[in-house]
Image (tube, helix red, strand yellow):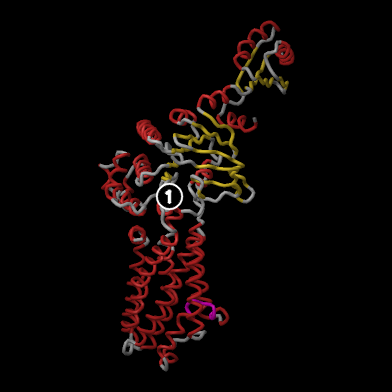
Amino acid sequence: MSTVVGLTVRGLLGRRRSLLLVVLPVLLLVLAGLTRWASEGSVAASASLTGGFAMGTLLPLMCLLIGTGVIGPEIDDGSIVYLLAKPLPRRTILLAKLGVGLVATVVFAVLPVMASAAIAGDEDLKLTAAYGLATLLAGIAYTTVFVALSVLTRNAVIIGLLYALLWETVLGGFVPGIRAVSVRQWALAPAEALLGDNAKAWGVESAVSVPVGLSLLAVLVVGATWLAIRRLQTLRLVTAD
Amino acid sequence: MTTIVLESVSRWYGNVVAVNDVSITVGPGITGLLGPNGAGKSTLISMMGGFLAPSTGTVTLDGGPVWRNPEIYRTIGLVPEPEAMYDMVTGQQFLLANARLHGLADAGAAARRALEAVDMVEPSDRPIATYSKGMKQRIKMATALVHDPSVLLLDEPFNGMDPRQRLHLMDLLTRLASEGRTVLFSSHILEEVEQIAGTIEVLVAGRHAASGDYRRIRRLMTERPHQYTITSSDDRRLAGALVAAGAADGVTVGAGALAVQTSDWGRFVHALPRVAREAGVRLLEVSPADESLESVFAYLVAR
């Protein structure tokens, strides 16, 4: 397990695109500073930045980078064979890689979003806590889905990008019917509940209730993980000869 | 002593049949899997290595299933064809990781032993990304040897090797086989295979075309019907004379050329000038029609 984790971490951070994992959060923090300066620490403005750009666009993109980075490249170039040709349950390999992805999601996405909420403007860190919870839940779901997608298809980045940008960001934000089947809305439900009376004033609203949101997230995460394990157990590895 | 048994194995992708009803038993010693490009060698090795399920038929390792059974990797060492490895780590770190993934008691010692076997101890503290093709091939070989497996499957291991590296690998494979291991490698070059393989399995267009030691395979390849294309001053007359002299099995008179088929080419090449002279026909051109490896293989399949 630890060896798979070690190789995965080196693979994730050793590639050039891992620079984006640092650049994007820094960009968010700069925006948060500008927002604070421009709106003089208004919590509503902070909530708008965090709920819109940070959670709506940056989080899915970061999860896409991470989720497709922990196993996809190895499947693409065939080097995954060195992990698969070992007397290890494939489940262990997938869970180790998913674990790396989830920790990276917390470090590079969830914590920066929280920091951005705190910097842009907050009241007793209420907003920070609420968005911390929402991005943690959404981040777990996104990264798990993107890891599963990388095992299921070689076009995971394209499909994931379309999903993240179109479904989650554009449609999930505006089209009422789709809002109810969007990870973002499910994860916002507990954040809305956490904020109580402040939620409406700060514009933290979800299209679904807390039990519905949490159970749909759980189903999605467990389902995606199960699917990914199943698929890795029967992953075809053959070169054209 | 480990044996891999393929029984009536077929594999198709959609409408394309990659491997067609192949039954092979691979036992201790070196087995060469010979066939032209696209014959299905990699598909077959993938199925033996548990990375592809046969569409029909069974692949077993000492009686146990290979597909969806990671325990087989305690017994099997695999040298895959793709060059990609974990480029960012050093050879030594990569070997150590492989040894740990196998759960070996003394992973460090196992990694060192494997590096020594392929003569890669000295460059092993450099990142794999800096290695030449031949060095990468040797590191791949080392990862397959790290857990001292009794079966070794190698997909085109000689590709991209210079003659010295080739000899070194041939020596290594021969040594491993003499220790009682089961070694199977694929290649599309007969000379490569016949130098070290005790048994040769010929695969053509997905079919198991021939099996045996290199003498038998050589004989099959030279004693096949040969085709010649001949142009002469009088094709019809020469055709008649060749058939009358019994020098050819079949003659087809085509547009401006004769197509001659013979199963005994030694007799044909001796008879041709004599028959032509006696018939008063001047030979303009005599050329073998199909001496490519592909056509040799194609004959073996059609047989």
In the image, B179 versus A65, the foreground residue is: B179
- For disc 1, the neighbor class at 10 Å (few under 14, some 14 to 19, many from 20) is many
- Residue at x 50% of width, y 38% of height: B26
- Residue at x 42% of width, y 73% of height: A140
x and y percent of residue A1 in the render?
36, 61
Look at the image and tell me whether residue B162 can be seen.
no
Q: How many numbered discs sit on the rendered protein?
A: 1
x and y percent of residue A215 in the render?
50, 79
Element carrying mark 1: helix
Residue A181 on the magenta segment: yes
Placement of A208 over or under B162, stated as above or below:
below
Q: Amino acid at mark 1?
A: Tyr
Span colored in magenta: A179-185
x and y percent of residue B92 in the render?
29, 48
- Residue at x 58% of width, y 81% of height: A177
The quarter of the displayed image where residue A3 is located = bottom left
In the image, A26 versus A197, the foreground residue is: A197
- Residue that badge 1 annotates: B73
Q: Is residue B239 left or right of residue B99?
A: right
Q: Is residue A177 left or right of residue B84?
A: right
x and y percent of residue A119 in the render?
31, 82
Placement of A30 over or under B118, stated as above or below:
below
Look at the image and tell me whether residue B78 can be seen.
yes
Residue A203 on the magenta segment: no
Q: Identify the chain of the residue marked 1, using the numbered disc in the image.
A: B
